[in-house]
Amino acid sequence: MKKLNVYLNFNGNTEDVFNFYKSAFKGKFIIIQRFKDMPDGNNFPKKDQNKIMHVSLQINKDIILMASDALESQGQKVVQGNNFYIQIEPESKKETDKLYESLSTGGKIEMKLQDAFWGAYSCMFKDKFGTGWMINYTYPKKK
């Protein structure tokens, strides 16, 4: 597998969530499409037309995070669960610290950033939007 991209759905706050993630990762939006931009976009209720139909955030050259708003007017409803995390493997301890500091702000820490028994610098938390994150920097093996 060359890449793994994560696709998230939110209950109408995708734009807020992705502006937060953009800031945390210092990424850039590849595309932001709103429901009103679809060919039949004017058929959506006014309150839904500016919601996000699709957003792609370029984190780095290999990683893209994507999402959309689930619309109740279309029979969709997202129920936040505890069945997933997005796992990140940073390239350095310094990068791990930066990601932890920015993504966990306002969230709930489940495992503080620490040296873990499996030989990594690791943490686990839910961000302020309820998305689960695991950050795991594996120390280089000693020769």
Image: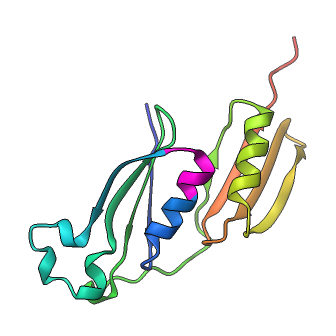
Is residue 135 found left or right of 73 in the rendered image? right
Image quarter of the C terminus: top right
The quadrant holding residue 136 is: top right
Q: Specify the farthest residue to the top.
A: 143
Is residue 9 found left or right of 114 in the rendered image? left
Which residue is at the front of the view, 116 or 66?
66
The image shows residue 106, relative to residue 97, as above or below, that is below
The quadrant holding residue 8 is: bottom left
Which residue is at the front of the view, 121 or 17?
17
Image quarter of the N terminus: top left
Residue 110, position in %: x, y? 80, 65
**Magenta-highlighted residues:** 21-27
The residue at the point 75 percent across, 31 percent down is 92
The residue at the point 46 percent across, 42 percent down is 4
The quadrant holding residue 69 is: bottom left
The answer to if 35 sits in the magenta stretch is no
Magenta segment main secondary structure? helix
Residue 64, position in %: x, y? 44, 44
Its colouring scheme is rainbow
The residue at the point 47 percent across, 33 percent down is 62
The residue at the point 73 percent across, 69 percent down is 106
The image shows residue 58, relative to residue 53, as above or below, that is above
Residue 99, position in %: x, y? 70, 47
